[in-house]
Image: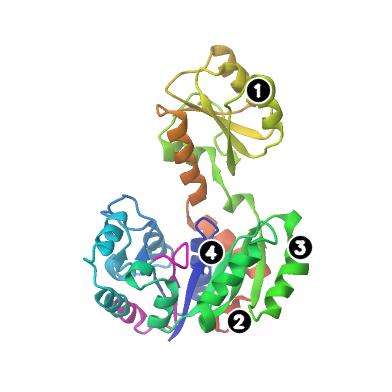
């Protein structure tokens, strides 16, 4: 069986989009492709009562008729982890469950694409990290990673050494234009010299990074105070308005594609944010509506204002989670990733199929 397990160095760097784009590309070439995510970690509830969203999307996009309990045999919820730590989960039984599900899904398939976790170590408490699963399923491994600076090389090389002979290679994703030359000229040749093949480096594109203001508002359950303003603006980071107006203005002018978080009663800070081109939305906390002058200025500038009841600290944590998870996975995002892969990666060699 031709099996590829796609893993990553950390969450939120496009692993799911790459996994599904590879599967769709093979399908379009006429291959019968199966999908599996052995450990469901992207759960819709903390106790794992609902399943990981990624296998659900895979079943829809790849038109699979497999059962969810086979596509995701382990619901890796906080409750599961707690039970495992207490010795109430049997690693051998779990491994057998994964292998049995895989064999059922792989029947009559030309290629199996297995989606790993957001971190190579996830599953270690039950002896089922991604390398363990690759061994159990006799799978090759693709490592997806981001790139911030040359310091990233340590994490990539360490992960490659952990994967060992199972590693097929690495794909860098979401690389800023300013970092691309450094990556291509220095880091990739270094990794090649350490026998770590690099299949390609994909650039940052707005459609696949960050979230839209609409997605952020929906995820947080915000009250939108500027209903006539387009919420399709793109935000990749947040900044906190916790200082005075002049200091805040200096800070805001140094950021870009950001949502500014502050209390609803901080009019001076809100006004400073509206003067900064890099602030794409205001997220006000504590349930306090802003002054009418701020709302009027926001309408003039076309900057959405969102309101939540939670305090600033709680809101920051929630925004971090949403931004870390990245864009909502849809058919459009998978198609866009497929285009990037076709332009920047030798997909045929990676999948070991003729495209």
Mark found first going from the N terminus, 2 or 1: 1
Q: Which residue is mark 3?
A: 182
Q: CA distance from mark 3 to mark 4?
A: 20 Å
Q: Tell me the magenta residue range.
A: 101-122
Decide if residue 269 is on the left or right side of residue 322.
Answer: right
Percent position of residue 166, x then y: 51, 82
Q: Which residue is mark 4?
A: 9
**Element at label 1:** helix
Question: Height in image: 243 above or below 328?
Answer: above
Decide if residue 170 is on the left or right side of residue 189.
Answer: left
Which residue is most to the left?
88
**Element at label 4:** loop
Q: Is residue 79 magenta?
A: no
Percent position of residue 158, x then y: 57, 71
Q: CA distance from mark 3 to mark 2?
A: 25 Å
Q: Which residue is mark 1?
A: 272
Q: Which numbered disc, 3 or 2, marks the residue closer to the eye? A: 3
Mark found first going from the N terminus, 4 or 1: 4
Q: Which residue occupies 50% across, 43% down? A: 320
Local packing at callout 4 (Cα closer than 10 Å; few below 14, some 14-19, many 20+) is many
Q: Which residue occupies 59% across, 65% down? A: 155
Percent position of residue 173, x then y: 61, 62
Q: Which numbered disc, 4 or 1, marks the residue closer to the eye? A: 4
Q: Which residue is mark 2?
A: 349
**Element at label 2:** helix
Local packing at callout 2 (Cα closer than 10 Å; few below 14, some 14-19, many 20+) is few
Whether residue 350 is visible here, answered yes or no, is yes
**Element at label 3:** helix
């Amino acid at each position: 069986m031709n099996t590829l397990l796609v893993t990553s160095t950390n969450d939120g760097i496009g692993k799911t989009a790459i996994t599904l784009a590879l599967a769709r590309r093979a399908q379009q070439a006429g291959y019968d492709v199966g999908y599996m995510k052995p450990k469901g970690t992207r759960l819709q509830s903390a106790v794992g009562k609902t399943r990981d969203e990624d296998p659900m999307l895979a079943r829809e996009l790849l038109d699979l008729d497999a059962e969810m309990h086979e596509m995701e045999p382990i619901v890796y919820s906080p409750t599961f982890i707690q039970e495992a730590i207490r010795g109430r989960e049997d690693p051998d039984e779990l491994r057998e469950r994964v292998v049995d599900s895989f064999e059922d899904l792989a029947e009559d398939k030309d290629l199996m694409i297995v989606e790993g976790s957001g971190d190579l170590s996830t599953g270690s408490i039950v002896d089922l990290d991604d390398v363990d699963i690759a061994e159990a399923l006799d799978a090759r491994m693709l490592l997806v990673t981001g790139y911030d600076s040359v310091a990233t090389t340590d994490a990539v090389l360490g992960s490659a050494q952990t994967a060992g002979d199972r590693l097929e290679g690495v794909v860098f994703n979401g690389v800023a234009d300013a970092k691309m030359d450094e990556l291509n000229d220095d880091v990739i040749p270094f990794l090649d010299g350490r026998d770590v093949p690099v299949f390609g480096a994909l650039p940052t594109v707005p459609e696949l990074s960050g979230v839209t203001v609409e997605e952020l508002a929906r995820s947080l359950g915000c009250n939108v105070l500027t209903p006539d303003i387009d919420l399709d603006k793109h935000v990749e980071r947040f900044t906190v308005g916790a200082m005075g107006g002049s200091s805040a203005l200096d800070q805001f002018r140094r950021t870009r594609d950001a949502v500014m978080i502050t209390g609803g009663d901080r009019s001076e800070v809100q006004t400073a944010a509206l003067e900064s081109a890099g602030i794409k939305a205001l997220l006000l906390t504590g349930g306090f509506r802003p002054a009418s002058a701020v709302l009027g200025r926001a309408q003039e500038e076309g900057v959405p204002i969102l309101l939540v009841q939670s305090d600033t600290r709680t809101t920051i944590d929630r925004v971090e989670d949403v931004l870390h998870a990245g864009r909502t996975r849809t058919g459009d995002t998978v198609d866009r990733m497929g285009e990037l892969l076709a332009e920047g990666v030798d997909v045929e060699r990676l999948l070991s199929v003729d495209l």
